[in-house]
Amino acid sequence: MIVVIQCAGSKRADAGSLSAPDGRPVRFVAHPELAPDDGEFYARPDDACGDGSTWRDLLLAINQSGTASPPNLLAAGTLYRPAVYQGLLEHVGREKLYILSAGWGLVRSDFLLPDYDITFSGQAERYKRRRKADRYEDFSMLPQGSDEPILFFGSKDYLPLFLQMSADHRGQRIVLFRSAEPPDCPDCVAVRYDTPRRTNWHYEAAERYMAGNLQLPVR
């Protein structure tokens, strides 16, 4: 089974960054024009970085080069602080774990990512918040032609991006939800996860999955 989990706002303290032309670390946010005037270099992943390329192009080239990456770029599966990410990585392996990132799209757990501050959460500061109408050239790295089931751990804010990034997947897609009514997720199997926990409830669900205590209607 392929497991997809949404990204987290909390990144490791040693997470690395790409470098701006003047040497400053790039702080990736959803809306640089709304960012504080504090001397930091803010950019979107799809902003130009020079020579007709974008920061996304540069990151892909770094991952494809096989050479030394900028200092401390971390694999997506190890970038986030919550222990559930490392737990899933050890449980299903790097080839089966994918991260749904509000900044970069759907990436495999071993894809190197820089530190970033982009989220779909309505509670975040405006310059960090990605809106539905914002244009992103998101990565979509699910294996082509696979009919393996996918299990998605994430909130309703991230569900539209998951549906978009996995629309061509041939296998079963299982979406967990905790609300009273199932979400609008055509061609998916919606499974209610009953918990009083409101914040990051999908971490609890992932922990139950790793413990073998999550019943799923896998075909």
Image: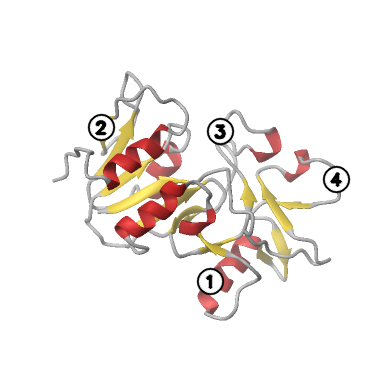
Q: CA distance from mark 3 to mark 4?
A: 23 Å
Asked if the residues shown at circle 3 and circle 2 are in contact, with their CB atoms under 8 angstroms apart, the answer is: no
Q: Residue at x 29, y 29 (%)?
A: 193
The answer for how far apart the CA atoms under marks 2 and 4 are is 45 Å
**Whether residue 194 can be seen here:** yes
**Amino acid of disc 1:** Asn
Element at label 4: loop
Q: Which residue is mark 4?
A: 38
Q: Secondary structure at mark 1?
A: helix
Identify the element where label 2 is drawn.
strand
User: Which residue type does callout 3 highlight?
Assistant: Ser
Label 3 sits on residue: 121
Other residues around mark 2 within 10 Å, as few (<14) / some (14–19) / many (≥20): some
In space, the residues marked 4 and 1 are separated at their CA atoms by 30 Å
> Label 1, on which residue?
63
Query: In the rendered view, does 178 fall on the left or right side of 58?
Result: left
- Mark 2 or 1, nearer chain start: 1
Q: Nearer the viewer, residue 130 or 217?
A: 217
Near-viewer residue (195 or 152): 195
For marks 3 and 1, the one nearer the N-term is: 1
Q: Mark 4 against mark 1, which lies toward the viewer?
A: 4
Q: If you read the primary sequence from the N terminus, does the residue marked by circle 4 or circle 1 appear first? A: 4
Q: Residue at x 80, y 61 (%)?
A: 24
Quarter that holds the N terminus: bottom left
Vertical position of residue 184 compared to residue 151: above or below: above
Tag 3–tag 4 contact (CB < 8 Å)? no
The residue positioned 27% from the left and 43% from the top of the image is: 209
Query: In the rendering, at what x and y percent does residue 68 appear?
Result: 60, 78
Q: Residue furthest left?
A: 219
- The amino acid pointed to by label 4 is Asp
- Dot 4 and dot 1 residues touching (CB under 8 Å): no
Name which residue lies at 45% across and 48% down.
Answer: 83
